[in-house]
Image: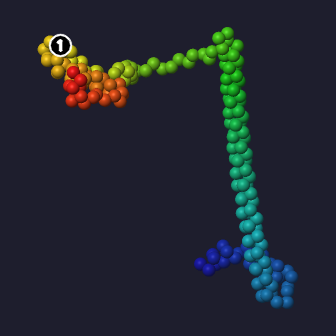
Amino acid sequence: MDTTYLRNNLGNCLTACLAEISEKRPRDPVEYLAQWLYKYKENMDHKAKIENEKLQLIREKEEFEKEQEMKEKRKLEADHIKEEDEARRKAEEERAAKEMSSPTKLPPVMEAKEPEDEEKKAAEQAAQPTTEPAPEPAPETTEDKPSGEQSEEKQEEETEGAKEEGGDTEAPPQGQEEEAS
């Protein structure tokens, strides 16, 4: 079990280090081994960092390309919308020119949607007067009443007519009228 761990994690590293130690024969081989392992670790970290940066660079390039495609699509859409607006504006100008060149110089009549039957009925009911005036009472003949009562009724009718017309005239008091007759 210990040998499998050493083979998997330290096998390549230790064999390369021991080969170098045997070739160079340093004065302190243990110190040399320690320094060589530290340097090996730094080199491995540096390689891993470079690989991660390459992967990140590839991802950023892909994102940049997608962003450029989106910008192109937006630009094409903006150009298309601009063309539609220009076409609409030109059509509006042509229509205005036709209106101005017509002999009557009246704008063309735009057809409106017909109102539905229910709406027509509601409009007709709104147009009709809702309250009907009360029928006027038949005038009484003067033959049936004595002369004093006739003058009082005429006076009341005159005051009511003046009030309806907004007049401020007041009827003279009853006592004065009787004295005058």
Is 142 situated above or below 26?
above
Furthest-top residue in this view? 103
In the image, 119 versus 46, the foreground residue is 119
- Residue 83 visible (yes or no): yes
Q: In the rendered image, which quarter contains the N terminus?
A: bottom right
Residue where numbered disc 1 is placed: 141
- Residue 66, percent from left and from top: 70, 47
Looking at the rendered structure, the kind of residue marked 1 is Thr
Q: Quadrant of residue 77?
A: top right
In the image, 161 versus 135, the foreground residue is 161
In the image, 126 versus 99, the foreground residue is 126
Looking at the rendered structure, the secondary structure element under dot 1 is loop
From the viewer's perspective, is 57 left or right of 165? right
From the viewer's perspective, is 150 left or right of 57? left
Q: Quadrant of residue 132?
A: top left
Instruction: Please rate how many residues cluster around mark 1, counting C-alpha atoms within 10 Å: few if below 14, some from 14 to 19, many from 20.
Output: few
- Residue 42, percent from left and from top: 76, 75
Q: Quadrant of residue 70?
A: top right
Q: Which residue appears at 67% of the width and 74% of the height? A: 9
- Residue 168, percent from left and from top: 35, 30
- Residue 17 visible (yes or no): no
From the viewer's perspective, is 24 left or right of 97? right
Q: In the rendered image, which quarter contains the C terminus?
A: top left
